[in-house]
Structures are given as structure tokens and as C-alpha cells.
Amino acid sequence: MQDKIRGRIPAMAAAAMLLGVAMPAIAQPAAAPAGQAASGFAIAPQPLGAALAQFSRATGLQASAPAALLEGRRSPGASGNLSAPEALRRLLAGTGLAGRIEGGAILLTPEPRAAAGDMVLPTVDVGASTGGGRWPSRGFVAEASAAGTKTDTPLIETPQAMNVVTRAEIEAQGSTSITDALRYTPGVISQYGATDLRYDWFTVRGFTPPVRYLDGLRLPFGARGYSQPRIEPFGLERIELLKGPASALYGQSSPGGLLNMVSRRPSQVAQNEVILQYGSHDALTAGFDSTGPLDAEGKFSYRLTALGRRADSQTQFLDERRIFVAPSLTWRPDAQTSLTVLAQYQRITSDGGGAPQALPVQGTLWANPNGRISTRRSLTEPGYDRYTGEQIMLGYAFEHRFDSVWQVRQNFRYSHVDSDSQRVQAYAFAANQRDVGRYAWGFPEISDAFTVDNQAQADFTTGPVRHRLLTGFDYQREDATYEESQLTLLRALDVFNPVYGLAVTRPPMANRISQGRNQAGLYAQDELRFDRFILTLGGRYDWATARTNNYTVASRTTSVIKQDDGEFTGRVGLVYRFDNGLAPYASVSTSFQPTAGTDRRGAPFDATKGRQYEVGLRYQPEGSGIFAAVSAFHLTQENVLTPDPLDTRYSAQAGEAESRGIELEAKASLAERLNLSLSYAYTETEVTRANRNAAGTSTLGKQLPFAPNHQAAAWLDYTFNEPVVAGLGVGGGVRYIGASYGDANNLYRANAATLVDLALRYELGQSLPSLQGAQLGLNVLNLFDKEYVSTCISATGCYWGARRTVLATLKYRW
């Protein structure tokens, strides 16, 4: 079956790329609506993409353009009793674009240049729109995203809950990791104390996303998850989280949600930035970001982002050294075509193994007669624990518009991740509650993956209904090799009075796992707009195959497991937009996720399946800088592994888990000086079907790990404009993380924690004009240095949360 899939893939890819000429029957736009007559317009100044979307709704004309053409452009707005052509002319004034209405659609082209060699640059209002890039944002407030639909769709029209963390919010809160950047997002819980230097671990609505996406393409994961890349937030424009099942567009994924990160891309407006940071644990960071046009005509633009970091950590013997470089180049031969080449290289080395070792529950979560175990305690042997991770990515994003109806896109990326870990870990705690038994092991993993996503989009009208039809085919191939050493038992360590100095060598290999995985999917989606209704219909069929070879050194034998999953998933969503900015929505979506392993008969497991029902209400008045949303969801996952009642040494797929709750989020960026973020999540999870294990216990009725019932956060950020304190910015936030279990049997419950963060910044140019563009900032996470246990996954698996972290930043932009 695997060979058959491989044979069909070239033909399927070719068919997907020919969709632009294979569907002429629907490619004819209908006659222009009667929107040419004079009517009242009230379109406020805002990013051009959002202004055109409002103009389209008011006139019934189809507005669609390549994202590269709208990048960084801001419309002055249009108000009054105007004809559609006149309103369009006013919307485009000063943007460097000209527009005309033709066949019911709006066609945009660059304005003619005043003289040969002159270049018309887009206007940019840095104060109002800090997002820039492909999808502009206003401070903390995002306006559109492609993560939910793979098209440039306003967030208010996406029929599933979405959270977006913009560049401005990442910087204001001093986030140095993806986990940090998501800490004010409802329904997202970081795992293991957010202190891992290798990976970002978190759950969404009670489920852990096994893979992440970068620029809409799936990132590698490896055979056991150790060769997944860590994405540097300094190289990102934004972070997007689509809640609930997303398989209708992306294929195999967690039912809880899908995380997509958007890279910084070349801009046609020259911008430069240099940062220097110093903070807790001798953390020293230097970075720069430079972008702009390469030629007078603006056909070529570049971006180069780089960062270097060296730091210790709150855990003894654990440090980090990181290098990140991300060059990119965009070529725009004409207004209808763009090609962006994106690359990045990152290397992380860490003495101490890349993450704190797990600690015993007595002395952390539970009382210990000997006292509390220090948050700095390390169980390692200095000189043994080590982590190295190297990742290389190279890809491109291509767009071309044929006419007012058809456009095609192709995104491609090759990824290579090479990780090597060797660590000392605890396995038992002695009766004296002092001595911990330890073992040493090593587990390197290498992964190579390439992913391609082909899309054809048609914007057309049939009668009173406007369509945005998306069809696509994507494919990913990933090959990974994971090796695991034997375990070497070490002498016990007194966790209250440790004596280090034991010589440890890496044990020999015990087994090797080689795995090849394929995913191929055909999908289609139609966004139908009728009056104020937006109906989204989507479906996808996936072919997912895997071959896993497990070689055991002791027996010199290799076991082979072949998996072949095929699944149809879909989504139906309906949104209604009121004039006052309210937009209620409802949706049903499904997911599937292949499950590794075999049952007691040696048969591979079927994929788990998820289904979500969601209703919500959004509020985003046009041009207001306010976005608020509330959603209620009921999510079910089937085919969950549970002990086989006939032989509990094995698993069977008779389990089921549910997650239901309510989430609220509100963000505002007002008067170009005030940014606000509020969130709350109530999540109720339960295992609704499960068998008993060999000990006679069951997880039936238990809560899912890392899923607190309550979570809340608030952040307020204000920049003063008064004469005495002009240029001073003050920000602060409070986070409440409810109590949660870290294990499936609900034995270890981490207590709730309330944490306070602080941010200060000052524009130095307010005092010294010669320093215009320079900013001095200070961020403090966990301001009151609260000591808390983040997670306990077992009796010797507890993790301290991050203690107070101070970071001073000197930034210069020009």
C-alpha cells in the first residue's frame, strides 16, 4: 500500500496544480452588483486589507489581492455619500496602488511611477499598525489570519476560536520562548514549569499538540518527539492558535488545537533593529533584524534576522548557548506574482541536559520531614548531562494571481533536525526521604522531512452568493532515527546534601528505531458569503502511512510495524455579521491522529478520532482596535488507548475522553498608547471510557493531565504622552493557573498559582533627540518570586515553576 501511495503522489500533485485550468465552469464572475450607485460609506483609517474587506461588504464587490501587494499599506479611509469607484479611489489614496471595478470584482495594480527609476513606497503608520508583514495588526489586536481557513480571512469571520499573539505583544511581555508567549492565552497550559531549553511543551483544551506548524507547513516531530525543532520567537511575526480539530485543512492533528507560527518576511519598507539584553542567571542576548528593498523598482526585498544567547538557569549546572540565523528573500516580478525564499539555522548546546531533572514528590509537592528540595537542585553528575540540537530549514512560498478569479499558491520546506541528549534521571526515592536512585542514559534522534502544500483559490459570484473556493493537495515525508542506550544505575544522591563527582560514561546502545512516515491529503473548502452570512464548508481525505523498524541489540532482532490509515474529516461553520461589530458563530469539526503501537494480537492501532461542537460570539467594531470573543465547546476523542481487559500488559482502543468548557478573550489597542489583554478559561475534562489495568485500577472518571478547571490572565500596557513622562511605558499582568493533575490516575495534583509580571520601557529620544529610535526596557516575570510546583507526573517526576526572571533590553530601531 505504501508503494502505491508513493506512485500516486506525483499524479495527484500535478492534478492539484492544474486546478486553475480544470474548473472553467465556475471561473466566470457574475455581472457586477448594483454597487456602483452612490451610497453612504463610513470606513475609518486602518490597514488596507481590512478597509477593502469593509468596502467589499458594503458594495457586494469581490475584493481579493495577493497578500504581498497589501503588505504594510494603510488606507486613509472613505466617508460620505460616494459612488463605489470614488470610495475605492479614496481608500487607495497614498497607498501606492490604483484600483478599478471590473466584472463585479476589484482589481488592484501599482500606481504608475512619476519618473523613471522612482519608486512608490507604501505608506506605513508604525504607531497604529505594529504588525506589518503579511497580516497587519494594531498593537495586540490581529485583524486577519490564514491559519483558520488557509485564505486571508478576517478573524471575526473564522468559524472556530482563534488566539493570535502579535509581534507587539511578544515584545511587550518580554517573551523569549513560544511557551512564554502563550502564557496569557486562554485554554493553554505550559508543562514541566516552562523551564525546558530544548522544547516547548503545552496542552490546549486538555490535549497536547504532537506537532507544530511554521508558515502553514507541518514541522518534523521524529520517531519519539526528540527531534522536533524549537522555534525562536525573535524570528516570528506572530503566533496563531486555532482551537479544536483542524484536520479538515491540515490532516492528522490533535483535537485540542493547532499551533501555527508565522516567520518575519521581507518588507518593501526599510526597517532595522538591534537588541542587547542582559538578565537573571547571567543571560546575555544580542540580535538584529534588517529588512527592505534591494532595488529601486522594488522587485527584490530581503530580511536577515539573527540572534545569539548565552545564559545559565535557575537549576544548578544547567546552561544554554544558542545561535539563530534566518535569511529570506522576496522576488516580485509583477503585481500578481511573488516568490519568497525562507531559510533558518539554529544550534542549541546545553550543559546540564537542556532541562531540569524531575524531582521527588516528597519535598516538592508533598511534605518531607527533611524540608523542601531547593529549586536549584540538580540530580546530574556535572560533566555528563549534555544536550545539542541543530536545525536547518529551507523553503519557499510562491503566489500567482491569473485574473480576478484564480490564484495559486505553493509552499515548500525541507527540514533537518539533529538532537543528542544524555541525562541522569531519578527512578526511586528511598524510605529515608533523602536518597534518590538515579540512572544514566542517552537518546539521540535525527529527522529529515520535506513538506509541500499546493493551493488553488477561486473568488467568484453565483447569483447573490460570493464564493471563495479553495482546493489543495499537500504531502509530507519524514524519516527519523532514534537510538536509546542501556540504563546505567548510579549510586544514590542525597537531595538535601548532594555530593557530586561520580565519573559517568555513556552506556552502549540498547535499541534503534527507524521510522518513515507519509501523509498525503486532498482538501476543498468554500467560504460562501450571502448578505451578512458566511458559511464555511470544508472536507479532506488523508492517506497516512508509517513503517517502523525496531532493532534490539541484545537479541539482534528487528521488529517491523506497518500502519496504513485513511480518514475523511470535515468542518461546517456559520458566521453572521451585524453592523455593530457583533458576529455569532457555530461550527462542527472533526480530527484524526494516528496512534503508534500494536495490540496484543500484533495488529496496529487505528487512528484516534475527535469531534468538536462549538458556538461563540465575537465583537470587533470596524477600525476600533478592539477584539473580544467568547466560545463554548464540547470536544470528544475516541479510540483512546486503555488497558486490554484480556491481558493488561497490552493496550486496547476502548477509551474515550471529553473536554468541554468556556473561553473568553478580549484585546484592545486604543489611542496608539493603550494595549489590553484579558482572558479566562473554564475547562472540564473527563475520561468517559476506560478499562482497568493490571493493578485493578482505572482512569475512568479521571481528569486529563495538564488541564486545570480555571485559568485567568490580564495584561495592561500604557505609554505616557504627557510632557514630564512622555515616552515612558508601563505594563503589568496577573496570571492565575488553576490546580491540575500531572498524571492519568490523578494521584499528583499541583496547587493553583497566581503570578505577577511587570514591564517598563522608556524612549530615550524623548530626553536626547540624538537617541531617537532607542528604547530601554525592563521585564520581570514572576515579580514576587513565587515558589510553586508546576507539574508532578509521577512519584519522582515533579518540576518547579520558573522563579523570578529579570530581563533588561536596549533596543535601537531606524
Image (spheres, helix red, strand yellow):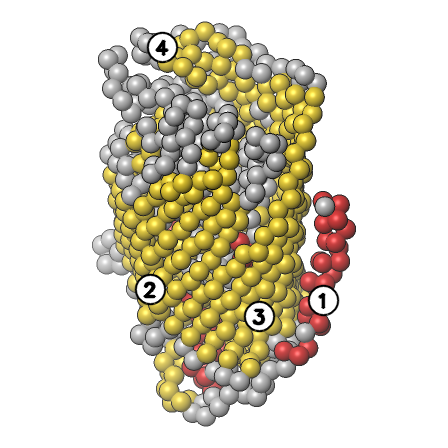
x 26%, y 33%: residue:
751
**Considering only vertical position in the picture, is 373 above or below 224?**
above
Residue 72 seen from this side: no
The numbered mark at residue 586 is none
Which residue matches tag 1?
18
- Label at residue 617: 2
How would you rate the neighbour count of disc 3 (Cα within 10 Å): few for under 14, some for 14-19, many for 20 or more? many
Q: Nearer the viewer, residue 405 or 526?
A: 526
**Where does label 4 land, which residue?**
430
**Other residues around mark 1 within 10 Å, as few (<14) / some (14–19) / many (≥20):** some
Q: Position of residue 512 (x, y in %)?
A: 65, 25
What is the spatial separation of the Cα atoms under label 2 and label 4, in whole angstroms?
54 Å
Report, in whole angstroms, how far the alpha carbon at label 1 lies from the one at label 4: 67 Å
Residue 359 in the image: state x and y as whole percent: 37, 21
- In this view, 714 is above or below 129: above
**Separation of marks 1 and 3 at Cα, in angstroms:** 15 Å
**Residue at horizontal 40%, vertical 58%?**
613
